[in-house]
Amino acid sequence: MPGGILRVTGDPHNYGRVYVSLCRNGEQYKTSVAHMVLLAFVGSCPEGMEGCHSDGNAGNDQLVNLRWDTHIANVQDAIRHGTHGRRRRVAS
């Protein structure tokens, strides 16, 4: 049966990323909206690359904000935007 219900899931542990659960033949798949947008409009993820949000907002899944890039570039973006998981050390 074509079509169906698209379920969007939110989780505070996802750092603002938006995921959808898709179901086909009774099997469920969870993927990020960013990944789906990149697949649909840019193409498959090149080897060694991952989806990156240029503005540092993991919930902004507009195509103009997304790109395939290296993990290192993604971490550098997060550091630049202050969204990296590491906390700054405070001198005691």
Image (cartoon, helix red, strand yellow):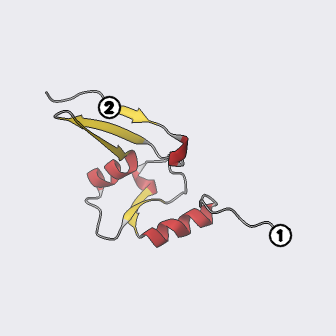
Residue found at the very far left of the displayed protein: 1
- Mark 2 and mark 1 lie on one chain; the one further toward the N terminus is 2
Residue 83 on image: x %, y %: 60, 58
Look at 33% across and 37% down and name the residue there: 21
Quarter of the image holding residue 68? bottom left
Give me the disc on residue 83.
Answer: none
Residue bearing the label numbered 2 = 6
Q: Amino acid at mark 2?
A: Leu
The answer to whether the residues at label 2 and label 1 have Cβ atoms under 8 Å apart is no
Circle 2 — which element?
A: loop
- Name the residue: 39% across, 52% down: 63
- Left or right, 83 with respect to 23, comes to right
Q: Secondary structure at mark 1?
A: loop
x then y, percent, for residue 18: 44, 43
Disc 2 from disc 1: Cα separation: 48 Å
Q: Residues within 10 Å of mark 2 (few under 14, many from 20)?
A: few
Which amino acid type is marked by label 1? Ala
Q: Which residue is mark 1?
A: 91
Residue 43, position as x, y percentages in the image: 26, 59
